[in-house]
Image (spheres, rainbow, N blue to C red):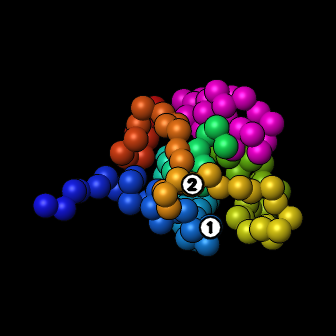
Amino acid sequence: MRKMRTYREYLIDIFTDRDEAIGHLQVALEDYQTHGNTDIFLFLLETVVEAQGGITELAKQTDMKPHVLSDALTSDDVPLIDRLGTILKALGYRLSIEPLEVESLNLETATTGGQAATAPLSENQGTPRQAGK
């Protein structure tokens, strides 16, 4: 019998592909800029981080402590993206997501047996955060 996966597990599988991750993040960012909902964008960003090596790997690449990164992605405080979005909108600008050249990055996605090595980002593993949390 086939094992059922959660939506998040499905996304983790497809987000191991950088182009898929970038495309989904671009759409989520556009949705955020249109509707002001950060929950979906942050859920997808957390999922991309998990799919492409997890918090521990990202912490190594950014020289940040894992708990600092995790807190930044899962905090209930007003997300930085909201503050940036408000400032940029007032100036007549908007955020966008564009890929960098892979050769110029120090990206080494940790994989094991074709699966991305992951570290949980939050207790909320299956669905986007609830609005107002």
Q: Is residue 69 left or right of residue 128?
A: right
Picture quarter with the N terminus? bottom left
Q: Is residue 14 left or right of residue 75?
A: left
Could you say where residue 77 lies in the image, as x and y percent from the top left? 60, 29
Kindly state the secondary structure of the residue where label 2 is placed. strand
- Image disc number at residue 81: none
Number of callouts: 2
Residue positioned most to the front: 113
Q: Please say whether residue 93 is one of the residues in the magenta stretch.
A: no
Q: Which residue is mark 2?
A: 111
- Image disc number at residue 18: 1
Residue at 37% over, 46% down: 127
Between 87 and 108, the one nearer to me in the picture: 108
Residue positioned most to the right: 104
| First reached walking from the N terminus: tag 1 or tag 2 | 1
Contact (CB < 8 A) between labels 1 and 2? no
Residue at 49% over, 37% down: 120
